[in-house]
Image (cartoon, rainbow, N blue to C red):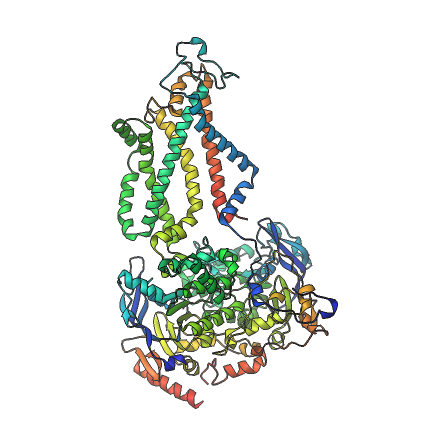
Amino acid sequence: MKDKIIISAKDIEVQFRVRDRFLTAIRNVSLDLYEGETFAIVGESGSGKSVFTKTFTGMLESNGKITNGSIMYHGQDLTKLKKEKDWAGIRGVKIATVFQDPMTSLNPIRTIGFQITEVIEKHQKLSKSEAKAQAISIMERVGIPNAADRFDNYPFQYSGGMRQRIVIAIALACHPEILICDEPTTALDVTIQAQIIKLIKDLQKELGFTTIYITHDLGVVANVADRVGVMYGGQIIEYGTVNEIFYDPQHPYTWALLSALPQLGVKGEDLYYITGTPPSLYNKIEGDAFAPRNPQALKIDFAKEPPFFKVSDTHYAKTWLLDPRAPKVEKPAAIQNLHEKILKMTAKGGAFHVGND
Amino acid sequence: MSAMTNRDVLLSLKDVEISFDNGGRKKFKAVQGATFDIYKGETFALVGESGSGKTTIGRAIMRINELSNGEILFEGKRISGKLSKQEDMEVIRNIQMIFQDPAASLNERATIEYCISEGLYNFHLYQNEQDRLVKVDRALEEVGLLPEHKSRYPHEFSGGQRQRVGIARALIMEPKLVVADEPISALDVSIRAQVLNLMNKLKNEKGLTYLFIAHDLSVVRFIADRIAVIHLGRIVEIAETEELFAYPLHPYTISLLSAVPMPDPVIEKQREPIVYSETTEEKTGPDYEMREIRPGHFVYCNPEQAMEYQKAAESIKEG
Amino acid sequence: MERISEDNLFEFATFDEKESEHIAAPRYSYWKSVWRTFFKSKVTVFLSVFVIVLVAFALIQPLQSGYSPTVAPNINNADMKYLPPSAEHIFGTDNIGNEVWDVVWAGARNSIIVSFVSTAIIMVVGILVGAIWGFSKKMDKWMIEVYNVVANVPYLLLAMVLSYVLGAGLGTLIFVMTCIDWIYVAYFIRTQVMIIRDREYNMASKCLGTKTFTMIVKNILPYLVSVIVTYISREIPGLISYEVFLSYLGLGLGTNYASLGRTISQYKSFMTGYPHLFWIPVLVLAAIAISLYVVGQKLADATDPRTHR
């Protein structure tokens, strides 16, 4: 890769203390993020996707601790930062986060304008009127109609989608290098989701920040991501470019996630589905964490943790199926020839064809 | 298919209007002029975004919300408004609901056994204790859970398991109609498929009829026989599933369709969301009504728009 | 599971769909967690034992001592008056030659009985009325008016009138203490019920045809255990002090009942000459009220599932 690494997490382990027991939420996860890219982290709830990125901004809940590993960012190890003031120049400034529920990020009793200018004034030496002008221009930039008129409105006067636009505006007010989007559209309607994703992509093109996009929906990932990491049981189990993950997935869990999408369903037939629940992270996980839910698991999956096997220079997967000794297992029928299938669905006459051509 | 061959109407909404008091000020009309029939044995989907009134309609059928106009008929009998105790209990048995958020809709302080038995207790649908336990075990098994789960509490389960408990307790009543209010939208994508499959399986086994409320067209394409698209309290388009996807006519339906994310990076990166806004296109007025554009395919429009939609449908047909 | 050896490592394992439905986490039981949380702190355990012993002693000791405020066997024996605390007379003796030890425990016994019985009545009536009140929109309209009237009755005036009319006795005092307080509990419960009444799980119960009464018992009250315990833990020591206060003013128990309040009132004139006479009943009162309160608060904390970690 010719690109420059902007942040590098190595062997991160995170533990939580819950009811006198220890829960290992992240199990030795490493990730290099390249400048300007969008890296999507996909996983179901409890996979650790949010917890992992919270370590980048020191926002773990008080009962959680990074127990191993390092996060190198501009020559500084972020895992060594302990005090609030150490984070001052990083959290919200260099690394900003957009959360799922915009209402929790906004102060309900302050005007939208106040909340944006507050951030601008804190980090830039600007006069009141300059800050206001800049805030209005940011509001316009994130697509708030009549921004000047709506400057003095309160959060409750905005719709959910508009609030999320404001949260994005605040996150970008300090021109961060890294924007962490933690399920930013999960609480929003589908049509609004499409608009917010487009907004984030457009802003990224314009401002050049690096994006970490966390979601449980692979459909969204196809749209936003350059690279994808699939998380399961506190580990990244497969990563690669977005095309590699969709067209040539290797890990049975990635297969399952993709195949279970209702978009790929055929009426009258069962959807491909995953049984059971993610592993309990209280217990020590032996072997491949997905094995108990994988109908085609090998015996070794229960005994020994698979290493990362190299698929291509950019594509790695943690599954014994890539071992030369393993039997050949085909990916589920639903995702074979995925591109051709979707091409047919979105072409004229297909179920998801839109457009007036 | 079943909808085509067996056209007995199970539930019918006639010009239903539901309004809420907005803090004593102007009444807010959450639903206006909703008229549709649900046929026995079909899965009828109501698709719309937040604030569209889809959940309000579902709750009106469950008689949680009162109508301010119109009526709801079940098997030809009016079930909206005041009912006698006897009628009331009968309707409850026949119409059951699956809720959106399985975490919020189960009593956290009751065991799974109680949650599933609740309906049995209320209607005394068992001969003795042993019979009740047998019924609970069977209900658990039907949704893929284990007898050992009986003594657990809801919060010990995963989202998908909890939703299956929600399904089990509704179906133990042996209802005719099940109102499923976004039953999978609070679940992880990975377990949605299991719940959808289960709902399909149980429908076929028990001959159920579903009103499936959703915010997303990708799910209903898979599960529904007919679809009604609702926007800001108005049903704007009704058609059979294949028909709707082949000939999406109302601009809002098209906007919804364009927003479905496709799991294909090359294609998805080229797709542009089509934004629909009521303010730019006037979509209601005195001469607006549901007009049949193609056989069985209704769109809310005025006569001129009906002409345009007909033309649009023609051009799609010619390809 | 089948045996795994080196040479069959790459064979398929058997798969049981049901296997993944098992819940690995240990079983959760609300009440077990409550007691585990409660007994986790050594201080709480010590205090609980202390309270139980204190209350039990106060209930039993007077039966055995047979003390009655209407008899004073040593009233003419000057040697038995104003004795300081000693091994023989643990709390000393008072101005009429009675054992302060006996006087105090007899008083404490009545205070405790009055407060426990009153609290029980207040809570039962309050919870019942409040739960129905919270559910019924029709009832809410007129109950609010009842609340406004009852809650504004001057307490002391009522206590005075009632003790004149009904005569100062145990029953009267319990009536005085309960006839107003229940409405506060009812109002409190009504507000709590209204908060959780419209939650989705209650809507679900309604859709299953569950009757209001069953919903109160199964859906509402279990969620209110913590707030009810909190309320009780304030009410019991509060009423003990209140009994003392009323009796101190002469509005509580009649002269033929032992009472901590009247004892304190009678002994207050000896505060300078024989301070132990005044301070001993005050300290016993404080010990009972404070330890009951603290233990109650700990129990209230333990009943809150958020503390079950």
* Residue C288 position in % (x across, y down): 46, 30
The total of numbered circles placed on residues is: 0
Instruction: Describe residue B55's horizontal placement relative to residue A7 as left or right.
Output: left
Can see residue A106?
A: no
Can see residue B117?
A: yes
Tell which of B286 and B104 is nearer to you.
Answer: B104
- Residue found 47% across the figure and 76% down from its top: B222
Tell which of C120 and B310 is nearer to you.
Answer: C120
**Above or below: residue A107 compared with residue B28:** above
- Residue found 49% across the figure and 31% down from its top: C53
Please tell me in which quadrant of the rendered image residue A36 appears.
bottom right
Please tell me in which quadrant of the rendered image residue A201 appears.
bottom right
**Above or below: residue A120 compared with residue C36:** below
- Residue found 38% across the figure and 82% down from its top: B4
* Residue A90 position in % (x across, y down): 60, 57
**Above or below: residue B319 compared with residue B85:** below
Name the residue at the right extreme: C6
Name the residue at the bottom extreme: B318
In which quadrant will I find the N terminus of chain A?
bottom right
* Residue A319 position in % (x across, y down): 67, 69
- Residue found 31% across the figure and 37% down from its top: C180
Tell which of A208 and B102 is nearer to you.
Answer: B102
* Residue B317 position in % (x across, y down): 42, 88
